[in-house]
Amino acid sequence: MSYIPADKLKEEAQTIIKEIDFSNLKPKDRLRIPMQEMPAQEPKARAKNIQEVALGYFEEQVKLEAERCLQCKNAPCIKGCPVEINIPGFIKAAAEGDYQKSVNIIKESSMLPAICGRVCPQETQCMAECTVGKSLKDMDKSVAIGRIERFVADWERAKGKMSVPEIAPSTGKKVGIVGSGPAGLTAAADVRKAGHEVVLFEAFHKLGGVMIYGIPEFRLPKEILDKEIDNLLSMGVKIKRNFLVGRTRKVKDLIEKDGFDALFIGTGAGLPNFMNIEGENLVGVSSANEFLTRANLMKAYTPDKADTPIFTGKRTAVIGGGNVAMDAARMALRVGAEKVYVIYRRTENEMPARREEVAHAKEEGIIFSFLSSPVRILGDETGKVKGIECLKYVLGEPDDSGRRKPVAVKGSEFTLEMDSVIMALGNSSNPLISQTAPEIGVNKWGNITVDEDGKTSMDKVYAGGDIVLGAATVILAMGEGRRAAASINKLLADNK
Amino acid sequence: MSKVLDKKMLSRDVVQMKLLAPEIASERQAGQFIIVQVDSDFSERIPLTIADADEKAGSITIIFQIVGKSTLKLAQKKTGESVENLLGPLGKPTHIEKFGTVVCVGGGIGVAPLHPIAQAMKNAGNRVITIIGARTKDLLILEDEMRSIADELIICTDDGSYGRKCLVTEPLKEICEKGGADLAVTIGPAIMMKFCAETTRPFGVKTYASLNTIMVDGTGMCGGCRVTVGNETKFVCVDGPEFDAHLVDFDNMMLRLRSYKPQEQDANHACHLQAAIDQLQR
Ligand SMILES: Cc1cc2nc3c(=O)[nH]c(=O)nc-3n(C[C@H](O)[C@H](O)[C@H](O)COP(=O)(O)OP(=O)(O)OC[C@H]3O[C@@H](n4cnc5c(N)ncnc54)[C@H](O)[C@@H]3O)c2cc1C
Ligand SMILES: Cc1cc2nc3c(=O)[nH]c(=O)nc-3n(C[C@H](O)[C@H](O)[C@H](O)COP(=O)(O)OP(=O)(O)OC[C@H]3O[C@@H](n4cnc5c(N)ncnc54)[C@H](O)[C@@H]3O)c2cc1C
Ligand code: SF4
Ligand code: FES
């Protein structure tokens, strides 16, 4: 993919629109409409600013993209969507220019369309099932469902008035939601709608979970998140920030002493993994969580205003191949690194990161070192990072995950000069809740175990999101929050 | 939001501050700490030990030394004003039981976090010997408070301006030699804790050190506070702050404490800091 300027994309769309008679489109005509690329900031410029990279479709583009949809009767895309959004339905409304109807259809299933439209891995979900992609024998050419979703959600936000859902009359029951990531936010809204009093506990001083401290501004502007959260507040959800359940108050005390009728635990997978290699505790090595938190939550990308320092190396190595690695690498560029390497032990094909993010990273000048993995980090006499020693790998037999397992090549050591290293090896679940509430059962990875209703082994306590699934996605966390909320609402309706 | 209920200077650059925080006051135990952030958008989150708490009044007390931008910002808050964010109580509480004789060793500002631990050890029926040290007499804090708890109080200054002219490790060694210690607890500069650990090691006296690494979230999410303890990586904010001092890699910890030194110096030119501290004395 090479970069095409936004105004060029707009012009092209305008030209094509004029040539099409939309009143009488046959499926083969629809297949002929070119897929609309996402307008983006110019790569060189954006690598030095924090503003959103993807700019969103122009109205002409939305029209064209929505008209590509074949309105399949069996709608395979819906099965690819973890929360089963009525995809052909909202696309049809968008094609007709009824954006309000379109966004309302999405909101029947997803509470955060402006966010999901931006961060969902559509290429492995809805788009992976799309008939258009299959017909064109190129799944990258499936209908760009997420881009249309984003457009209509942004349209509603720009209009100013967001529809506040109806709240049932007060039931006198009280539910606590622990954690304000997508799982917690969704559960809070759904439980509140049923008329229960809802208190949302968040350890941080800001709400949003990974969406605020992890996913960077250039991919998900915080203004969007704030709007969604305002919406929640307008529903009458009470919010307690700076409240670490397990320490500020134990789970048991919330139920037994403070009178909560049910609790939902959505505390996420916040524990950064390290490799346990030599040199990992040198000065200049950080976890991606630490690096991104300093940058995002503590706003260290505005050094003239923020008090929180960030380690701004000139040559930065990021270890890992997921979204977290892409975000850390691209953020490193934006806070001043001159050369950023991503070191990943498999090849580009196995990378768990979203393809769009990898493409963006490449355009911005991130250097990828595939099939290599660090063996140790080298330090100078003052304990600062000066380099990283890696081994080359080849792909062997497939492992449990079905991906081909990387095998080290003996004697293939090579050294790269670096002054900072960011470990982006994924996250495990934070053990605080299970340590302070032994009644809540966990599996061998420390994830909380739940039944099909999202209930934990402790009475009145439900859980969902990354704390149950391990590091997953925003949309799955939302789905889990929704499921547990339904169970809680049922529980509270049953014991009147 | 937490209101500043009271503020007083304990020495030229040490501030004692009482904050309204009923939830923290009722849950906290000796050895735990809080994270303070003066304002939400651009301030740093800094860890400070809960020096004391009054459950009835719903207040907690912190004692901190002005060493940089964030501690200065906090010190500049006036009684009646508020700090935006206060998270706690964090960390595992100190393991308190009847050990016999407990030697509590505090250096500099470390005497503040040591105080609640000494108190709890005393309440659990231990004989408590306290050794407190400072560079010079004026920098010594909480002498009276410590005296009222301890069965024996030993004061050391580097320059001999008060008490014994020696490092805190000297009386610690004497006590160990006499076989008079069942447990030692040490809090202070990393270098002091390191040498306390070396002092007690040959005598096999179990020693706890409360570590003051750099932190961001204080909830186990970032790993910025990691230290090496017995060849394992531990997070001070959730696994600590107290660890077996004989297993802590203090050298690595000291390196990591200096991680952001260039930026910190930028943020606070020493003379600017001194001028600001002068302002506070009025
Ligand atoms: C850098 C990065 C990039 C990502 N990019 C994508 C992407 O592009 N697309 C995608 O779909 N997914 C992405 N993910 C994954 C996605 O963000 C998570 O799967 C999702 O946020 C999980 O939601 P959650 O609600 O379970 O938990 P979280 O979002 O982790 O939220 C948990 C919240 O609970 C709070 N908390 C924790 N413990 C306590 C406690 N004891 N008391 C009170 N509060 C507590 C935490 O402070 C946090 O705010 C990314 C993740 C990271 C780290
Ligand atoms: C669990 C814990 C409990 C603590 N309890 C107390 C307490 O009760 N009273 C108190 O005064 N301090 C305490 N500290 C240390 C305190 O957090 C730091 O002094 C503070 O973060 C410095 O912030 P600053 O912006 O003012 O200084 P900065 O500008 O960040 O630093 C100024 C100077 O202080 C040094 N420094 C920075 N961070 C630390 C640190 N964490 N520890 C030691 N030196 C540091 C720097 O190397 C630099 O030389 C505690 C730390 C931890 C981890
Ligand atoms: S599968 Fe593709 S073409 Fe068919 S309805 Fe879904 S989005 Fe439209
Ligand atoms: S301060 Fe972030 S993990 Fe301890």
Image: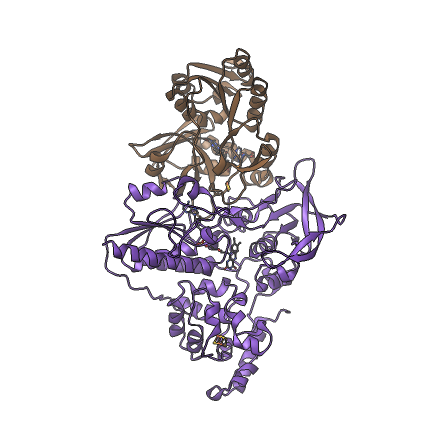
Specify how the rendered protein is coloured.
by chain
Residue beneath the point at 67% across and 47% down: A374
Q: In this view, does B75 lie above or below B96?
A: below
Which residue is farthest right? Answer: A411
Q: Is residue B119 above or below residue A430?
A: above
Image quadrant occupied by the N terminus of chain A: bottom right
| Circle count | 0
Residue A15 in sight in this render: no
Question: Residue A266 location in percent, x, y?
Answer: 41, 51
Residue beneath the point at 50% across and 13% down: B180
Residue B50 in sight in this render: yes
Image quadrant occupied by the C terminus of chain A: bottom left
Chain A, colour shown: purple
Task: Answer with the quarter of the image where residue A182 lies.
Answer: bottom left
Question: Residue A426 location in percent, x, y?
Answer: 55, 51
Question: Residue A378 location in percent, x, y?
Answer: 69, 41
Residue beneath the point at 36% across and 46% down: A458
Task: Answer with the quarter of the image where residue A190 lies.
Answer: bottom left
Q: Is residue A329 above or below residue A122?
A: above
Question: Residue A486 location in percent, x, y?
Answer: 34, 59
Task: Answer with the quarter of the image where residue B231 lies.
Answer: top right
- Say whether residue A461 is left or right of residue B176: left
Question: Relative to the observer, which residue lies in front, B272 or B110?
Answer: B110
Q: Is residue A390 above or below residue A475?
A: above
Chain B, colour shown: brown
Which residue is farthest top? Answer: B178
